[in-house]
Image (spheres, rainbow, N blue to C red):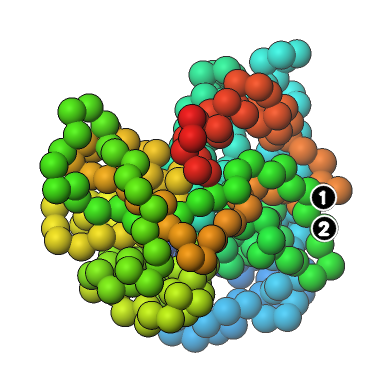
Amino acid sequence: MNLLASMRYLVALNEHKHFGRAAQSCHITQPALSNALRALETEFGVVIVKRARVYVGLTYEGERVLATAQRMLRDNEVLLQELRSEEGDPRGHLRMAAVPTAIPMLSRFAALLHQRHPGIMPAVLSMSSQELETGLESLSIDLALGYTERMHLPGIKLTAWPQSIEHYFLLRRAQTPSSDTLRIGEPIAWAEAGKLPLCLLTPDMHNRAIINQALREAGVPAVPAIETNSVLTLALAVSIGTVSSVLPGGMVAAVRSHRELEALPLVAPEVRTPIGFMTQEGVRPSRALDAAVAFLQTPQWREQIRLHSGALDG
């Protein structure tokens, strides 16, 4: 039995919650995955997977094996990167994730990081805040970009690098398209914005909770015309339809080339949300993660943050 491979299959099963999809992600057949997990149970002398016609979860012992598997796989990746990298030339995978509205910022970071270190292969994932917490806890993601004030993991300390204090804008079609890029218009009150047909993220997203709270403070209900879990849908629905949306500066910056749109700063109340990168404290970083953390503290990246997030004063 290949212990490391079997541990990888267990981690994949926990991630996908489905035998077939887990096997597909590992590029093996479902019987091969099941046989490997049974061999793992024989090796440790415990039942790891609860038996049913479909996946229903892991046993208590299985959860303990899973935690070890996650640490083993991460330690293996760290070791591989140390062996394959040279001084000033880090090589290896880097799993990064962001809340949906911070995906433009993370995508920009990944592209510039790869430009700086071509040997790093970033994976950019979109996750809810809860999924970010789970990923940081399980070490399945190396670097998270999200709401630093929200992230609290029992028994686990996080290291955070503040990036931006996000401001919020009403995004809508302009009555008259500008000659070049998206126009930043005059401020609008949340109470007025709440009366418009809005396309908003689904209630399970923390961004939606922020918007709901602002609308409650403004005395209007949050009753969207369209709900979605896709930030692309937010922008497209405004661009091609009759709805508006509420977006942070980082998202507005991503659609600046759409001259038919305009963004109005939202006021009364003033809503400001800290966004930052986070990792689990006390965990040995990979060479790729070390390089990423070094880059996010450079003047080059800080200038990107200034220009493409927050109040968009740049």
Q: Secondary structure at mark 2?
A: loop
Instruction: Check disc 1 and give the amino acid type.
Output: Glu
Picture coordinates of residue 180, whole percent (x, y): 22, 27
Rendering coords of residue 206 (x, y %): 52, 67
Q: Amino acid type of disc 2?
A: Lys
The answer to whether residue 61 is visible is yes
Rendered image: mark on residue 210:
none
Q: Position of residue 141 (x, y in %)?
A: 62, 50
Q: Position of residue 83 (x, y in %)?
A: 74, 24
Q: Callout 1: few (<14), some (14-19), or many (20+) C-alpha neighbours within 10 Å?
A: few
Sequence-first disc among 2 and 1? 2
Cβ atoms under marks 2 and 1 closer than 8 Å: yes
In the picture provided, is 47 more to the left or to the right than 260?
A: right
Task: State the residue position of label 2.
Answer: 157
Seen from the viewer's position, the closer of residues 183 and 74 is: 183
Give the position of the N terminus as an image quadrant. bottom right
Q: Nearer the viewer, residue 304 or 88?
A: 304
As displayed, is residue 189 above or below residue 258? below
Task: Give me the residue at 69% from left, 44% from top.
Answer: 162
Neighbourhood count class around disc 2 (C-alpha, 10 Å): few under 14, some 14–19, many 20 upward: some
Q: Which residue is mark 1?
A: 281
Q: How far, Cα to Cα, is label 2 from label 1?
A: 5 Å
Observer-nearest of 112 and 238: 238
